[in-house]
Amino acid sequence: MILFKTNANGSVSQVKEKSFKLERDIQRLFEQNLQIIMNLEMVKSECTIKDRRIDTLAFDPQAKSFVIIEYKRDRNTSVFDQGITYLNLMLQHKADFIVEYNECKKGQLKRTDIDWSQSRVAFVSPNFTETQIKATDFKDFSIELWEVKQYENGVIAITPIKKSKTAESIKQVASENAALKTVANEIKTYTEEDQFQGKSEEVIALYERYKSAILNLSDNIEISAKKLYIAFKKEGRNIVDIEIRKNGLKLYLNAKKDSLDDPKGLARDVSGVGHWGNGDYVIKLIDDNDLEYIMSLIKSLLKSAL
């Protein structure tokens, strides 16, 4: 990606990239802005569990899972092997991770509060090699790669590397590696099809209509299926989440309490109620009668996210 800035006379000039001097500079950037960048809760920096040092231990409050973040300036490191090691560390020493969270956050998490199947590892680096990208290119593999670059005038570009459309399942190679087999059996990456199980054709069709309408609102809206809902994201931020129920849909709008302009009053405030989706408002749907109006609400969220 080449960045340019517009000058006063209408001409453009290139914004030059600046290298990170230290790996710690990348770590500090992410840890100080973890909620904004990755929508994660910071737990502890430089965390050690069973003689394994973790750069950043984070928690995903929506997936109810832990996330290990590692920062790399060395392009020759095997992110695949290290990622498997960290995933197994989480699965084999669950109590230690809960203790770290409770001590650092003064929380009361219990083992049953965590969805261990959603555990994941994220690597952050200015550049990844093709070998590193290919080694983690499995559609159901919970190792993420995030590229970060800094430029003049304090500009930062952060790009999550997407899985390819032809990515295979990690289960196809898991039998060759005992550690990988353990991870593949316990950790799951969900798909839209998982949410369709046990749902009627009518409800699935209703979801598809709302899905199509949301995707038509803006370019580059991404779909990310979770265990209990499907997230629609723009530039890494959840805009709306859809929970597919047996008798309809629950649509969660990612807006804070008292910030949503909803003249019809369709959205219910759930800020004080436990729920899975992001945001403080939910709309229950059994038909598409208000589809156009609901899209106007979502469009307002898209504008505020930019």
Image (tube, rainbow, N blue to C red):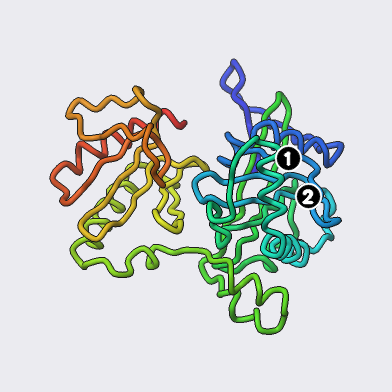
Q: Could you classify mark 2 by the number of other residues whose Cα lies within 10 Å: few (under 14), some (14-19), or many (20 or more)? A: some
Q: What residue type is labelled 2?
A: Ile
Q: Could you classify mark 1 by the number of other residues whose Cα lies within 10 Å: few (under 14), some (14-19), or many (20 or more)? A: some
Instruction: Name the residue carrying label 2.
Output: 54
Number of marks drawn: 2
Q: In which quarter of the image is residue 94?
A: bottom right
Q: Where is residue 224 in the image (x, y as percent from the top left)?
A: 46, 54
Instruction: Name the residue carrying label 1.
Output: 44
Q: Quadrant of residue 200?
A: bottom left
CB contact under 8 Å: marks 1 and 2: yes
> Can residue 101 be spotted in the picture?
yes
Image-based side of 31 in relation to 218, left or right? right
Q: Which of 91 and 118 is in front in this view?
A: 91
Q: Position of residue 269 (x, y in %)?
A: 30, 32
Q: Where is residue 102 in the image (x, y as percent from the top left)?
A: 66, 41
Q: Which amino acid does label 1 sit on?
A: Lys
Image-based side of 271 in relation to 201, left or right? right
Q: Which of 10 and 294 is in front in this view?
A: 294
> Can residue 130 be spotted in the picture?
no
Mark 2 lies on a secondary structure that is strand
Which numbered disc flags the more N-terminal residue, 1 or 2?
1
Mark 1 lies on a secondary structure that is strand
Residue at 54% x, 66% y is 188
Image-based side of 154 in relation to 187, left or right? right
Which corner quadrant holds the N terminus? top right
